[in-house]
Image (cartoon, rainbow, N blue to C red):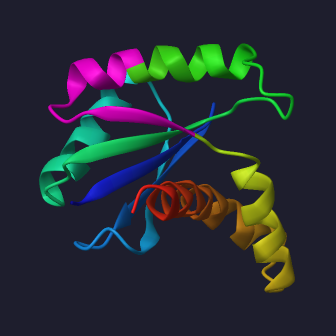
Amino acid sequence: MIILGLDYGEKRIGVAICDELGMVARGIATIARKYWKRDIEQIAGLVREYDVEKIVVGYPVKLDGTEGIQCEKVNRFIDVLEAGVSVPVAKWNEALSTKEAEGLLREADINRKKRRGVVDKLAAAIILQDYLDHNS
């Protein structure tokens, strides 16, 4: 099953995809957010291009397990996304995936400017990999 992973942010959406066996996730794109319709059209295009059967969206639950303002924003995004794609959409606790991605890029000694270009798709890959690891 091909699954698309999304790391939704206010400025960018990181995108990752898994292999056909559902074992390995890799970042494939960063969508610069403009407006809902364009964002959803780009995601729907990726769903068609990669024959995606499911989408997993990072869900920013707080460390204490409660939902905050960011969860409300992601819920609104998911509502619009579900109306614009023909595959099921699932939430997955993103558990500081962006911070983890930034740390990995710092450890790899990638400069700040280059990190900004890849951190979102790496965060999406971390979210999707965690989902795959827990659902295989």
Q: Position of residue 51 (x, y in %)?
A: 13, 56
Total numbered labels placed on residues in the image: 0
Q: Does 122 sit above or below residue 48?
A: below
71 drawn magenta: no
96 or 32: nearer the viewer: 96
Q: Position of residue 41 (x, y in %)?
A: 25, 34
Q: Residue at x 86, y 28 (%)?
A: 64
**Relative to 74, is 42 on the left or the right?**
left
109 or 53: nearer the viewer: 53
Q: Residue at x 54, y 60 (%)?
A: 121
Q: Residue furthest bottom?
A: 108
**Relative to 120, is 25 on the left or the right?**
left
Q: Classify the position of the N terminus by image quarter.
A: bottom left
Q: Position of residue 43 (x, y in %)?
A: 30, 42
The answer to which image quadrant residue 49 occupies is: bottom left
Q: Residue at x 72, y 18 (%)?
A: 67
**Relative to 110, is 19 on the left or the right?**
left
Q: Magenta span covers which residues?
A: 79-92
Q: Residue at x 84, y 35 (%)?
A: 63
